């Protein structure tokens, strides 16, 4: 059993001095071609931040466990599996034991909505502030910043899925392959399923078609690497064992996610398109026709508001 030194007993005051020794950076690998409207490779040094070190993350997990913000997947999960996670540890052990065994093959834990911790909320704000020059021109009005941290030992995966938010995905430790698909590719995820996800949060039919796997772009990342991808970009990860060494068998990554005026506008169009599709029409997807989007967005917002009044519907965050 590989033990995480100090993970169980470290008290809060161990981490009292959590301000980084220097200002961290995040930048595009190819600045001339980078656009926040499509995927792109990043470089950063947030892996050196005190809050991203494994003992501190173990403490964060202990703090989040009572509020069910620690999530787990079954060891048999593969990339084509449904994206399901549980607040229950699969083998019935406690969160301290998870981190004591975190280097055992297949170990996997995700920390959800880490912005509920004020230290990590400040960390996320720092990340998006450093990335603002990459994002703000094309996607103004950034709001609802959140963070999701994934800690695993290879071989392990995160299944194929989509998110509502834009994602600054940063590798913190170890190595991983992040595969991202074009968010506009309707063969990979049908427009109907994107709309169902935006409106209802359903990933039931968002599954990888193995025949289309080669349409994804593989980003081979190590600590200090990252990937940006816009909302609804299908993605998945895998870790292999070829880089593992004694004491160096853990992969850590963080998704810093956020909405913008653009994602909100597109979500409103999806709301409208879903109703049009239910009426037997074939509406144009958001982003392809600015004048159609401009006409649909207020209709979509009104649809969400009406459903909320009449049916108790609560529109997902960032979609109204």
Image (cartoon, helix red, strand yellow):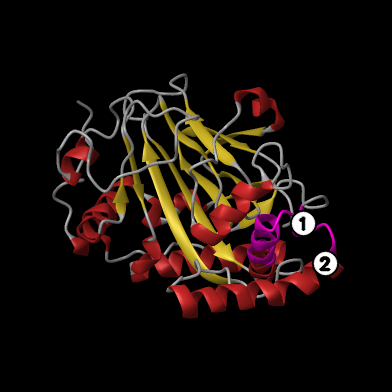
Tell me if label 1 and label 2 are in contact, CB under 8 Å.
yes
Residue at mark 2: 292
Of the 4 image quadrants, the one containing the N terminus is top left
Q: Viewed as shown, does residue 103 lie left or right of 265? A: left
Can see residue 208?
A: yes
Up-down relation of residue 92 to residue 320 (above or below): above
Q: Position of residue 110 (x, y in %)?
A: 36, 46
Give yes or no for residue 185 being in the magenta stretch: no
Residue at 64 percent across and 69 percent down: it is: 264
Which label belongs to residue 283? 1
Residue at 60 percent across and 64 percent down: it is: 130
Can see residue 43?
A: no
Give yes or no for residue 272 being in the magenta stretch: yes
Q: Viewed as shown, does residue 199 lie left or right of 249? A: right
Q: Which residues are magenta?
A: 269-289
Tag 2 secondary structure: helix
Circle 1 crowding by C-alpha within 10 Å: few under 14, some 14–19, many from 20: some
Label 1 vs label 2: CA separation?
A: 9 Å
């Amino acid at each position: 059993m590989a033990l995480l030194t100090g993970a169980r007993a470290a008290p809060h005051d161990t981490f009292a001095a959590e301000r980084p020794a220097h200002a961290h950076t995040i930048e595009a690998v190819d600045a001339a071609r980078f656009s926040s409207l499509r995927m792109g490779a990043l470089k950063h040094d947030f892996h050196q931040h005190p809050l991203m070190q494994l003992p501190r993350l173990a403490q964060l997990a202990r703090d989040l466990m009572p509020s069910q913000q620690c999530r787990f997947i079954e060891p048999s999960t593969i990339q084509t599996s449904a994206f399901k996670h549980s607040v229950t540890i699969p083998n019935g052990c406690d969160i301290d034991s998870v981190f004591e065994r975190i280097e055992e093959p297949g170990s996997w834990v995700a920390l959800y909505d880490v912005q509920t911790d004020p230290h990590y909320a400040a960390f996320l704000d720092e990340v998006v502030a450093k990335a603002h020059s990459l994002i703000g021109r094309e996607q103004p009005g950034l709001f609802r910043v959140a963070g999701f941290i994934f800690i695993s030992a290879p071989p392990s995966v995160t299944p194929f899925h989509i998110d509502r938010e834009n994602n600054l995905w940063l590798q913190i430790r170890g190595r991983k392959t992040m595969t991202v698909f074009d968010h506009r590719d309707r063969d990979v995820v049908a427009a109907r399923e994107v709309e169902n996800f935006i409106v209802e949060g359903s990933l039931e039919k968002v599954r990888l078609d193995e025949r289309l796997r080669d349409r994804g772009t593989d980003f081979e990342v190590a600590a200090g690497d990252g990937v940006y991808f816009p909302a609804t970009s299908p993605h998945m990860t895998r870790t292999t064992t070829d880089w593992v060494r004694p004491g160096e068998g853990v992969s850590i990554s963080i998704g810093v996610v956020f909405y913008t005026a653009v994602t909100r506008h597109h979500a409103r169009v999806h709301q409208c398109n879903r109703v049009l599709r239910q009426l037997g029409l074939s509406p144009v997807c958001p982003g392809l026709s600015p004048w159609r989007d401009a006409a649909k967005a207020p209709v979509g917002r009104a649809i969400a508001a009406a459903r909320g009044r009449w049916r108790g519907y609560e529109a997902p965050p960032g979609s109204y």
